[in-house]
Image (spheres, rainbow, N blue to C red):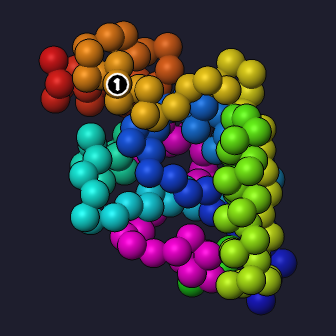
């Protein structure tokens, strides 16, 4: 086992927000390698296809040399992390509700793989209210989203939903 610190930040990223980008950029400074995992269930329909999500994320994160976007279907993050020799799961917190959810998740992850720790990063104040579900709602109603998402998302929406 190497001494490299390897992180895994997971989500559905449907779509990626500027809050996600901020957390990922900050997390990338903590690790030698950071994987950003798009986790999805084939049975559940998202607004954006997995390929579109991957394209938007890769474009938004292209300046971060140690970040690699991956996808995982119907997999536990802790199992994917073990396969990638991840040392830390990275989770973002916007509020107390997120903390309650994440602490419960960490309880199980730690039992499934005691070698992997979880690191929590608080969302920056300006992103604490931004969520992918609200962005999907704004897209549905054709409202402006450019203050909340990377340009790669705005471009995809303009191309596919206008």
Using the rendered view, name the quadrant where residue 151 is placed: top left
Instruction: Return the residue at label 1.
Output: 137
Q: Farthest residue toward the top? A: 144
- For the N terminus, which image quadrant? bottom right
Q: Which residues are magenta?
A: 57-82
In the displayed structure image, the side of residue 36 where residue 86 appears, left or right: right
Whole-percent x, y for residue 156 in the image: 26, 30
- For the C terminus, which image quadrant? top left
Q: Nearer the viewer, residue 78 or 25?
A: 78
Identified at 68% across, 84% down, the residue is 112
Identified at 62% across, 76% down, the residue is 78
Identified at 25% across, 14% down, the residue is 142
Whole-percent x, y for residue 22 in the image: 65, 34
Whole-percent x, y for residue 25 in the image: 67, 40
Whether residue 73 appears in magenta in the rendering, the answer is: yes
Relative vertical location of residue 104 with respect to residue 84 in this rendering, above or below:
above
Whole-percent x, y for residue 21 in the image: 58, 36
Relative vertical location of residue 135 with respect to residue 28 in this rendering, above or below:
above
Relative vertical location of residue 160 with respect to residue 24 in this rendering, above or below:
above
Crowding at mark 1 (Cα within 10 Å: few <14, some 14-19, many 20+) = few
């Amino acid at each position: 086992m190497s001494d490299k610190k390897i992180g895994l930040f997971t989500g559905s990223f449907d779509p990626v927000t500027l809050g996600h980008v901020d957390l990922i950029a900050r997390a990338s400074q903590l690790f030698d390698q950071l994987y950003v995992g798009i986790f999805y269930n084939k049975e559940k329909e998202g607004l954006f296809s997995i390929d579109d999500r991957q394209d938007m994320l890769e474009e938004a994160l292209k300046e971060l040399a140690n970040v690699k976007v991956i996808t995982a279907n119907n997999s536990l993050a802790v199992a994917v992390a073990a396969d990638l020799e991840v040392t830390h799961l990275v989770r973002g917190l916007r509020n107390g509700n997120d903390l309650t959810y994440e602490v419960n998740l960490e309880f199980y992850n730690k039992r499934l793989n005691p070698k992997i720790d979880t690191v929590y990063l608080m969302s920056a104040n300006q992103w604490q209210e931004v969520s992918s579900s609200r962005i999907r709602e704004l897209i549905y109603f054709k409202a402006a989203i450019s203050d909340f998402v990377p340009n790669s998302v705005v471009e995809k929406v303009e191309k596919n939903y206008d």
